Image: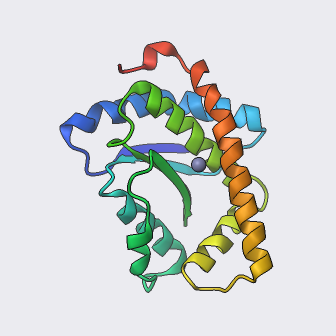
Amino acid sequence: MTLVIRGHRLSRQHQEALSHVERTAGAAAQLVCRRMGVRLHHTEIVVTTSQMTPDLLIEAHRSMFGNQLAIWGLKRMPRSDFGITTINKAGILVVINADRCRSGGELDKTLVHELAHAAQFSRPGGRDTVAGYLRANYRIDRMSGREARDANRRVAGDEREAERLESLAAELPAGASIR
Ligand SMILES: [Zn+2]
């Protein structure tokens, strides 16, 4: 398992969030992968702000689908989420929003939730499923009504699984909390 952690355009007030993620991400990934029985693909965790989140996502998707990727996609990118997980050319990208995660507890829960998505995308065929979904979202390919319904059902199932696993955050070392 390769886990790379970095901050992106963080102000000083957010440095603590980055340090917290650096301390707990490895343990969180281990807990999640053991529970799900999955080996994580190469995963990069980037701690950033609401404002920078869309840029990171578009950069990840451009690494997969090319520079001509429609910019309108940017406007549709979520800004307010605690975190979001997607794929890029190198593997998987987890974005943690330091503006939204205001405590160590929220950071831990978000890390576990997003790493659960990373593990889902690391399952056999998981990456192809996400790529197909993105290609449809960006209008690179069309999905039939049935394919779209299947994809939506899978996304909803993944979301429920990630929410269930959030309770694992309680098993992370308590000393790691920042507040
Ligand atoms: Zn989720």
Residue drawn 22% across the image and 35% down it: 13
Quarter of the figure with residue 51: bottom left
Q: Provide residue 29's location: percent of width, then percent of height.
A: 60, 35
Q: Provide residue 84's location: percent of width, then percent of height.
A: 50, 52
Q: Provide residue 132's location: percent of width, then percent of height.
A: 67, 74
**Which quarter of the figure is the C terminus placed in?**
top left
Residue drawn 30% across the image and 30% down it: 16
Q: Is residue 1 visible?
A: no
Residue drawn 67% across the image and 34% down it: 165
Quarter of the figure with residue 52: bottom left
User: Which color scheme is applied?
Assistant: rainbow
Viewer-proximal residue among 50 and 146: 146
Relative height, residue 61 to residue 176 (above, below): below
Viewer-proximal residue among 175 and 89: 175
**Which quarter of the figure is the N terminus placed in?**
top right
Viewer-proximal residue among 76 and 176: 76
**Side of 100 where 84 appears, left or right:** right
How many numbered circles does the render carry? Answer: 0
Residue drawn 34% across the image and 48% down it: 48
Q: Provide residue 127's location: percent of width, then percent of height.
A: 68, 62
Q: Residue furthest left?
A: 12
Q: Is residue 177 visible?
A: yes
**Side of 154 where 31 appears, left or right:** left
**Side of 106 where 139 appears, left or right:** right
